[in-house]
């Protein structure tokens, strides 16, 4: 399913027939568009029976998480400011953790590094003057520096139940 979805998406975006699309994987398993050649980049994510795919003209990362029963989230992967925000979030803390986590996953996919880096050094912030529940746009800070993004969104999507979806597009 992932491969078929990825081929259809790349073909549509490149305006080429599906049989001209070739997708391979790098040494870490990340998908790479081999043909058609050009600037297009691809990111894939899956959870349970869901698949998310995203294509852009530059570095891109996508992640998806199903929202199940609340759990004790691992604080060691969070920036101190994220911990404080989640402590103040009350009953929505579980969903907000998933928003932060999917955004971090999408970001490191866009970078092409995966979690070879310390996730607690990456901070996901809602836009100024808005709480996490108010908007889907987010800001990312890496090692204390604001990351320039072409697009950074993370939020709830209703499919066959609530799902958290994040997509980060970095400038070329």
Image: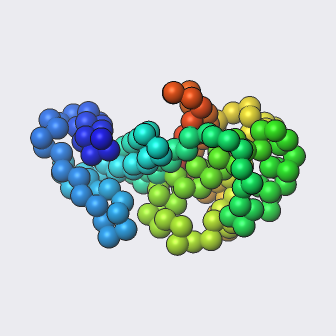
Q: Nearest the camera: 157 or 18?
A: 157
Give the residue at the far front of this rendering. 69
Q: Quadrant of residue 99?
A: top right
Q: Quadrant of residue 121?
A: bottom right
* Rendered residue at 44%/39% (across/down): 50
Q: Is 28 located above or below residue 20 in the figure? A: below
What quarter of the picture does the N terminus occupy?
top left
Residue 123 horizontal side relative to residue 170, left or right: right
Q: Is 101 located above or below residue 162 in the figure? A: below
Q: Nearest the camera: 161 or 158?
A: 161
Residue 73, position in %: x, y? 72, 55
Picture mark count? 0
What quarter of the picture does the C terminus occupy?
bottom left
Q: Nearest the camera: 102 or 160?
A: 160
Q: Is 115 located above or below residue 53 in the figure? A: below
* Rendered residue at 28%/61% (across/down): 25
Residue 164 horizontal side relative to residue 62, left or right: right
Q: Is residue 46 visible?
A: yes
* Rendered residue at 47%/46% (across/down): 47
Residue 143, position in %: x, y? 67, 68
Residue 92, position in %: x, y? 77, 38
* Rendered residue at 51%/27% (across/down): 159
Q: How is the image coloured?
A: rainbow
Give the residue at the far left of this rendering. 19
Q: Is residue 57 visible?
A: no
Residue 36, position in %: x, y? 18, 48
């Amino acid at each position: 399913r992932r491969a078929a979805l990825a081929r259809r998406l790349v073909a549509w975006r490149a305006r080429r027939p599906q049989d001209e699309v070739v997708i391979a994987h790098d040494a870490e398993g990340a998908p790479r568009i081999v043909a058609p050649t050009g600037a297009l980049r691809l990111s894939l994510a899956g959870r349970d029976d869901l698949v998310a795919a995203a294509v852009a003209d530059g570095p891109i990362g996508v992640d998806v998480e199903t929202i199940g029963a609340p759990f004790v989230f691992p604080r060691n992967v969070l920036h101190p400011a994220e911990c404080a925000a989640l402590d103040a979030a009350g009953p929505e803390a579980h969903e907000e953790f998933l928003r932060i986590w999917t955004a971090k996953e999408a970001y490191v996919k866009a970078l092409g590094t995966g979690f070879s880096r310390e996730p607690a050094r990456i901070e996901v912030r809602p836009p100024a003057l808005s709480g996490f529940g108010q908007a889907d746009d987010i800001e990312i800070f890496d090692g204390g520096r604001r990351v320039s993004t072409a697009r950074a969104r993370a939020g709830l999507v209703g499919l066959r139940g609530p799902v958290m979806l994040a997509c980060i597009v970095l400038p070329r």
